[in-house]
Structures are given as C-alpha cells and as structure tokens.
C-alpha cells in the first residue's frame, strides 16, 4: 500500500507535530513523484485539486501499518472515494475537507488526498512545491 503526500507529511516536516512523527514511524520513503493538478495554500497547509496540466511535486511512501490510513483520514478530515460517491449519488451534504482517492503514479498504485472545498486562484502555489512559511 502506497501514499503520495505533497504537504506537511513530506519528510521535511516529519517533526512538525505528533501526527507527522507517527506517520513517518509507520511508513517507508520510496521516491519523489509528480501528479497533474493544482495546489493552493489554505491557512498553513496545502490543498490539492487533481487534473489539468500543472504539476504538483511530492513523495511516495510505503505504508507499513494497516490502520494508518484510517488515522490519516481523521487527521485530514477525509472520506473515502467510495463514501464520496455514495454521498454524491444520494445528494447528501459533504462536510469533509478531503476525499482519499486511489490513483496510479508511474507504475505504483497510490492513495492521495484531494481537497473538496473552495480554493482561491490567487492562493495557487504556481511551482507545485509546498514549503511552509
């Protein structure tokens, strides 16, 4: 099981808080990677919108703990891709910040968190690289 991260879960921020430390204790860094999409600043963290022609740069990790994805879902206030589809089908309100999607990056199947809320174009991170300020 792999995950693509593009923000505060990157290895640069592994000591940012208790959660990032737990993430890095239960994963193995594999490589740098790129996805097509746009990244925006939301307060102090990034928000990714998949698609388009722009690039977002991040890292791929192997997840070593079977419960880590559920923990990340709580940390990110995320719902699964399946839960998201059901809510859309039934026109239920979506209150989560992110949806956890399953995508292919090169030859790896990865989980990725896509932001569901509104974004401001003026807050787009044009170079596709998140750096905390």
Image: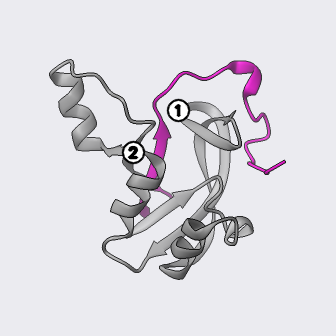
Asked whether 69 or 29 is in front, the reply is: 69
* Image location of residue 5, percent across then percent down: 57, 57
Look at discs 2 and 1 and give the one toward the viewer: 2
- Residue drawn at 63 percent across, 31 percent down: 53
Asked whether 85 or 133 is in front, the reply is: 133
- Residue span colored magenta: 105-133
Asked whether 39 or 78 is in front, the reply is: 78
Q: Residue furthest front?
A: 18
User: Does the magenta run of residues contain 104?
Assistant: no
Asked whether 41 or 15 is in front, the reply is: 15
Q: Give me the disc on residue 78.
A: 2
**Label 2 vs label 1: CA separation?**
19 Å
* Image location of residue 13, percent across then percent down: 71, 65
**Taking 73 as reference, is 25 left or right?**
right
- Residue drawn at 78 percent across, 34 percent down: 126
Question: Can residue 107 be seen by looking at this rendering?
Answer: no
How crowded is the residue under tag 1: few (<14 C-alpha within 10 Å), some, or many (20+)?
Answer: few
Classify 20 as above or below 128: below
Which quadrant of the rendered structure holds the N terminus? bottom left
Q: Give me the disc on residue 51.
A: 1
Q: Residue furthest right?
A: 133
């Amino acid at each position: 099981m792999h995950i693509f991260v593009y923000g505060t879960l990157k290895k640069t921020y592994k000591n940012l808080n208790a959660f990032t430390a737990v993430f890095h204790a239960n994963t193995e860094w594999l490589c740098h990677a790129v996805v097509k999409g746009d990244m925006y600043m939301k307060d102090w963290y990034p928000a990714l919108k998949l698609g388009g022609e722009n690039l977002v740069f991040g890292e791929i990790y192997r997840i070593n703990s079977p419960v880590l994805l559920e923990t990340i879902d709580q940390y990110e206030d995320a719902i699964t891709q399946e839960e998201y589809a059901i809510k859309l089908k039934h026109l239920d309100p979506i209150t989560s910040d992110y949806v956890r999607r399953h995508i292919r990056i090169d030859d790896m199947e990865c989980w990725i968190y896509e932001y569901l809320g509104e974004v401001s174009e003026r807050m787009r991170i044009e170079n596709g690289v998140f750096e905390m300020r």
